[in-house]
């Protein structure tokens, strides 16, 4: 490894990358040279994580892999320089996204049936542009409507590793409704 | 919307720091205000849910006649002010009317509560379903989100532009993308605008680029004789277009003197 | 300073920033609170620099201010990952590039007006990094938005000598578009 150690290479690569790096991508860093095993990589990541204790950045794992993230306690200082110009989404957008996240794969018609209003094409396109949703197939019913699902980037951007981490609403609405009605069916069903 | 989850009521406004959840009965409300309120609903289910929650009612035990009455009052208003939006709301009104009429009918011996075609059960199911999504959307919005709540820690890697592993693009893909755009725009086009031929637009870019380096150019800097007549015409059109779009200014000290192209910066 | 120390805040801000931070910008991080003096900031930067000795990133001062930068010796490793067979550009990317190529010089707002959705900052950055587009000036309208145009490298990479060689849409998509080639139509022009 040219005398550079594994941890050092990973550190640089993680900071240089714009997207999370997964184990596979980390392996490709080493090109034709003998690439490290997953165990070696995980050990190095663990050690790297420890090195950054007490620092203003930390190593986190999300769906797409590992990335460095600025520590949460700095939020008030960075709020002034936030990059997200379109940080606020309309209720219609959020409800459409929620339908896709919690019920995926889901068709537009199914979203409309639950929301009781037509789904705005702009909203769907915007969510696609944001790379939070994509078409994963077509439903075998008349018209073969597109089936939407969330992407890895959606999980990454919301800081999740898997869809299981989506907040469930059980805990917030105490008794009013039938309990099993709130058992979300997440992954691929229907 | 947080308030909604916690207190089962939607605050219409905040007065002296405390949420106002009911329109005082003796208060005159100008129609415009109600229009604003209606605008804040995401559809008939949302409105219905609001009417139910406003009275602190359990969805499962809604009094259909009362809800129908209130709902119709809103619909009448909607009908007056925003007719084009009313379709979805009118469908719901019809559903409510059906539920109400069924409730008035005497029950036969063969009927039971689990009747699959019971419109009331179906309505309740839809309301519960919609409420789940509505609350989920609120929760989703509260999750820490990249760039809004947390940021990626990254460092520059000069000289490693390719790190992002740029895929190759075939020219035809670009053309198809633009064709799609045009086709899409055509569908929603309201009026036509003429665009300069590409060579002119390219020349505009070039002139702008030169102006970035030197904020002032002479006209003769932009006319190169080896381009011939066509080149001159393109440069001329580009400059005219740029002046029109406010991208540069033409300056001349006195008649007969050198003409300068000046950057607007 | 909320108990967070100056160095810690600077570290997070520098890693979060997409552009170098100069002393003035660093001061604005502290908002209305009493902002640190330049001397305090420089001391903290110096100490931060020392902390990163031996790490794969280091604090450097460039024309625009300070930034973290990946060490040069990592270059061969980071270059490796570019061999990774990359996916395809998204439709959003291609459409943005196409808009800039065919309509240059064009502002982001003009692209958005035609595409009907916000232009993703990532996409613009990526096209700039690829050196296919660049800012050639600013439009004299409120906000003075940047005007984008394609570069010589764009022509090179697509095998053209001049933009006139860009295929005419007519020939490829016979029916969809207006016959007169340059009579583009936009919905919300500015």
Image (cartoon, coloured by chain):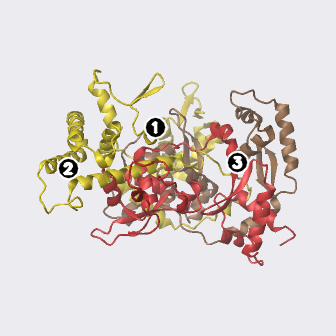
Chain colours: A red, B yellow, C brown
Residue at the image position 76 percent from the left and 75 percent from the top? A36
Give the structural element (helix, strand or loop) at label 3.
Answer: loop
> Along the line of sight, which residue is nearer the eye, B140 or B166?
B140
Say whether marks 1 and 3 touch (CB < 8 Å). no
Question: Which sits earlier in the primary sequence, circle 1 or circle 2?
Answer: 1
Instruction: Using residue C166 as the reference point, say whether residue C7 is left or right of it.
Output: right
In whole angstroms, how far apart are the C-alphas of marks 3 and 2? 51 Å
Instruction: Using residue A87 as the reference point, say whether residue B121 is left or right of it.
Output: left
Say whether marks 3 and 2 touch (CB < 8 Å). no
Instruction: Using residue B29 as the reference point, say whether residue B144 is left or right of it.
Output: right
Residue A82 lies, in percent from the top left, at 61, 41
Q: Residues within 10 Å of mark 3 (few under 14, many from 20)?
A: many
Give the residue at mark 3: A71
User: From the viewer's perspective, is residue B21 above or below residue C69?
Assistant: above
Is residue B48 visible in the rendered structure shown here?
yes
Residue at the image position 59 percent from the left and 32 percent from the top? B258
Q: Residues within 10 Å of mark 1 (few under 14, many from 20)?
A: few
On what subunit does the disc labeled 2 rest? Answer: B
Q: Quadrant of the N terminus of chain A?
A: bottom right
> Along the line of sight, which residue is nearer the eye, A132 or C74?
A132
On what subunit does the disc labeled 3 rest? Answer: A
Instruction: Using residue A27 as the reference point, say whether residue A158 is left or right of it.
Output: left
Residue A132 lies, in percent from the top left, at 50, 57
In whole angstroms, how far apart are the C-alphas of marks 1 and 3? 29 Å
User: From the viewer's perspective, is residue A173 above or below residue C141?
Assistant: below
Give the residue furthest to the front: B109
Quadrant housing residue C123: bottom right
Image disc number at residue B95? 2
């Amino acid at each position: 490894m040219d005398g550079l150690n594994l941890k050092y290479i990973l550190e640089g690569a993680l900071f240089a990358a714009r997207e999370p790096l997964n184990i596979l991508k980390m392996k490709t860093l080493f090109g034709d040279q003998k690439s490290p095993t997953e165990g070696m990589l995980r050990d190095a990541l663990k050690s790297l994580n420890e090195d950054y204790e007490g620092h203003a950045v930390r190593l986190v794992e999300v769906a797409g892999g590992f990335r460095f993230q600025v520590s949460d306690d700095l939020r008030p200082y960075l709020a002034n320089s936030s990059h997200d110009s379109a940080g606020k989404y309309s209720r219609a957008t959020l409800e459409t996204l929620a339908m896709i996240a919690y019920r995926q794969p889901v068709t537009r018609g199914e979203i409309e049936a639950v929301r009781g209003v037509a789904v705005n094409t702009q909203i769907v396109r915007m969510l696609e542009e944001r790379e939070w949703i994509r078409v994963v197939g077509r439903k075998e019913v008349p018209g073969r409507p597109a089936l939407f699902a969330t992407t890895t980037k959606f999980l990454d951007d919301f800081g999740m590793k898997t869809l299981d981490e989506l907040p469930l609403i059980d805990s917030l609405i105490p008794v009013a409704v039938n309990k099993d009605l709130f058992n979300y069916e997440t992954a691929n069903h229907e | 919307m947080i308030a909604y989850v916690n207190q089962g009521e939607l605050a219409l406004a905040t007065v002296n720091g405390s949420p106002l959840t009911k329109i005082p009965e003796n208060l005159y409300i100008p129609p415009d205000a109600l229009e604003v309120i209606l605008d804040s609903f995401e559809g008939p289910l949302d409105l219905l849910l609001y009417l139910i929650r406003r009275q602190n009612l359990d969805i499962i035990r809604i009094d259909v006649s009362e809800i129908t009455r209130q709902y119709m009052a809103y619909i009448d208003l909607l009908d007056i002010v925003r007719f084009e939006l009313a379709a979805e709301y009118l469908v719901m009104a019809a559903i409510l009317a059906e539920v109400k009429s069924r409730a008035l009918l005497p029950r036969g011996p063969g009927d039971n509560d689990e009747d699959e075609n019971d419109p009331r059960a179906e309505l309740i199911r839809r309301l519960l379903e919609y409420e789940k999504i509505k609350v989920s959307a609120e929760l989703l919005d509260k999750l820490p989100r990249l760039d809004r709540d947390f940021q990626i820690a990254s460092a520059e890697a000069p000289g490693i532009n390719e790190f992002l592993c740029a895929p190759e693009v075939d020219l035809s893909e670009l053309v198809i993308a633009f064709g799609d755009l045009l086709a899409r725009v055509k569908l929603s086009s309201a009026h036509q605008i003429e665009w300069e031929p590409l060579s002119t637009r390219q020349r505009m870019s070039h002139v702008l680029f030169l102006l970035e380096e030197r904020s002032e150019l002479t006209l003769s800097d932009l006319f190169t004789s080896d381009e011939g007549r066509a080149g001159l015409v393109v440069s001329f059109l580009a400059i005219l277009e740029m002046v029109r779009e406010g991208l540069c200014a033409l300056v001349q000290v006195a008649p007969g003197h050198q003409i300068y192209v000046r950057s607007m910066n």
